Amino acid sequence: MKTLIAIPIFNEAGYIPAVLQRIKEIGCDVLAIDDGSTDETPRLLAADPDVAVITHPENRGYGQSLIDAFNYASVHDYDWLITIDCDDQHEPEFIPMFLERAARGDIDVISGSRYLKTLPGNTEAPDDRRSINQRITQMINRELGLSLTDSFCGFKAYRVEALEKLTLTIPGYAFPMQFWVQAHHHGLRITELPVALIYNDPNRHFGGMLDNPEAREQHYLDVFDCERQRVNAVRRVGAKQSPCMSLDES
């Protein structure tokens, strides 16, 4: 399988050298998406000739970084794309597990789950993050008939051919809400694999209104509802409807 490992990055200079080294040892091509970093991230990425880089001149959001990675994987004819965060909360040593599962050829999305199984070295998730994840995941399962245990984990493997069916537009942290609706709508085959639950900095901010847990959860629900309405309209009239755009996260 021709596989790309993509890493969304925003101001992660303290983690980049070690994380990139561990990822490169896997032996796959590597893409970094620098989402408008203002620290030493651009210099560190420029100094590594083994890593392809997409640079946003300003911060455009985690979702937009993933969308750019999806497009890059499609244009460059990759079979599989693995996304992993650069803040040392995802263990690159789990990547071979994703590759082995992908090689079986019977799945389109392999989603890491921090709650599927208790693993050695797990930490505690911040209360608001875990509770929101739990409620949103239960809602997604109820509304879409899925059986997820962790709807927000960014550690995933995607069959690139399957991604090409989707029209994704949400640039911020609500991106998974649109993704799951469209994945279900297009009949993508989904499974989960257990990954470590690691929070090195439980006080990290989302930014803007999303730092308020109630506002963040409502934002996720609004994006989910908008996308459900859109795909339901597509089913009814058989015509393409304009995709949902991101709500204001500032």
Image (cartoon, grey):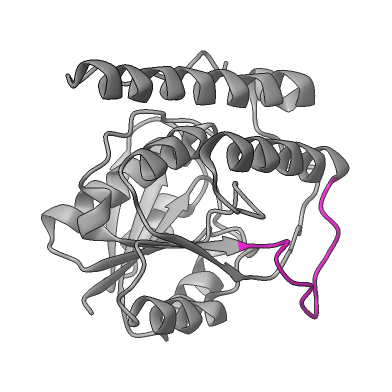
Quadrant (top left/top right/bottom left/bottom right) for the C terminus? top right
Residue 109 vs residue 122, the one in the foreground? 109
Q: Is residue 205 above or below residue 190?
A: above
Residue at (74% x, 37% y) in the render:
135
Quadrant (top left/top right/bottom left/bottom right) for the N terminus? bottom left
Q: Residue 164, how many percent across, how many down?
A: 20, 48
Q: Is residue 48 above or below residue 226?
A: below
Question: Is residue 140 visible in this depiction of the protein?
Answer: yes
Residue at (65% x, 33% y) in the render:
206
Q: Residue 91, how many percent across, how many down?
A: 60, 73
Q: Residue 103, how many percent across, how many down?
A: 33, 82
Residue 116 vs residue 187, the one in the foreground? 187
Q: Is residue 153 above or below residue 233?
A: below
Q: Residue 120, how many percent across, how many down?
A: 80, 80
Q: Main secondary structure of the magenta part?
A: loop
Which of the 4 image quarters holds residue 179?
Answer: top left
Question: Is residue 244 visible in this depiction of the protein?
Answer: no
Stretch in magenta = 113-126
